[in-house]
Image (cartoon, rainbow, N blue to C red):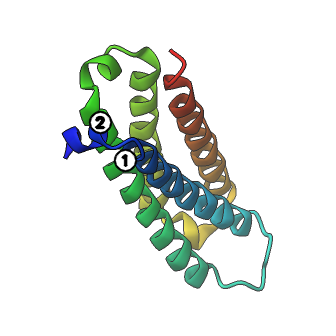
Amino acid sequence: MLTALGSHPWAYPMLEVVHLFGIALLLGNLVLLELRVFGLGPTLPVDALARLSQTLAGLGFVLAAVSGLTMFGTMPGELLANRVFTAKMALILLAGCNAGLFHARDSLRKLDATARGLMVVSTVIWLLVLTCGRWIGYT
């Protein structure tokens, strides 16, 4: 499969499109849920919105992870030596820990200042992941 990426001129760019689509699903749905946590759309039930946005964000994460791992497989040595790639992976791990804390404390039920703070941290982390992802190509 990794050989096929190099033999077709459109294969790798399409993989990047899948990766970007996954990121858009992930980040877009997290921001949507964050806006609700901050009080926008107060008539929208949090539980229903959370189920939908978390499902779509999860799908986005899976698309980004699978396409990202496939892209990683085309040049693992170069990427592992790249400090920006390492930072991106550390940020993704940090995002996972933040999400774990958010859900462990049942933040969607509390909708308190800590929940809002964790949502802001999540969005900032994912924006940094996005920034690192773009920056990798230039380092």
Residue at 49% x, 70% y is: 56
Residue 30 placement (x, y as % from top left): 59, 60
Which amino acid lies under the numbered mark 1 shown in the image of this protein?
A: Ala
- Cβ–Cβ below 8 Å for labels 2 and 1? yes
CA–CA distance in space, label 2 to label 1: 7 Å
Q: In what element is the residue under mark 2?
A: helix
- In the rendered view, does 14 fall on the left or right side of 27? left
Which of these two is toward me, 45 or 101?
Answer: 45
**Which label's residue is closer to the chain start, 2 or 1?**
2
Q: Circle 1: is it few (<14), some (14-19), or many (20+) Cα within 10 Å?
A: some
Mark 2 residue crowding within 10 angstroms, few (<14) / some (14–19) / many (20+): few
Q: Is residue 101 above or below residue 136?
A: below
Say whether residue 137 is left or right of residue 36. left
In the picture, measured across the screen, residue 80 lies left or right of residue 133, that is left
Viewer-closest of 61 and 41? 61
Which structural element holds mark 1? helix
Q: Which residue does the numbered mark 2 point to in the structure image? A: 6
**In the drawing, what numbered circle is on residue 49?**
none
Residue 132 point in image, percent of width and height: 54, 29
Measuring from the top left, give residue 71's x and y in whole percent. Answer: 33, 38
Task: Residue type at mark 2: give it.
Answer: Gly
Figure check: 15 above or below 138 = below
Disc 1 designates what residue? 11
Residue found 24% across the figure and 35% down from its top: 73
* Residue 105 point in image, percent of width and height: 47, 60
Q: Nearer the viewer, residue 77 or 62?
A: 77
In the image, is residue 75 above or below residue 43?
A: above
Residue under the image location 55 percent in, 63 percent down: 107
> What residue is at 40 percent from the left and 48 percent from the top?
15
5 to the left or right of 14: left
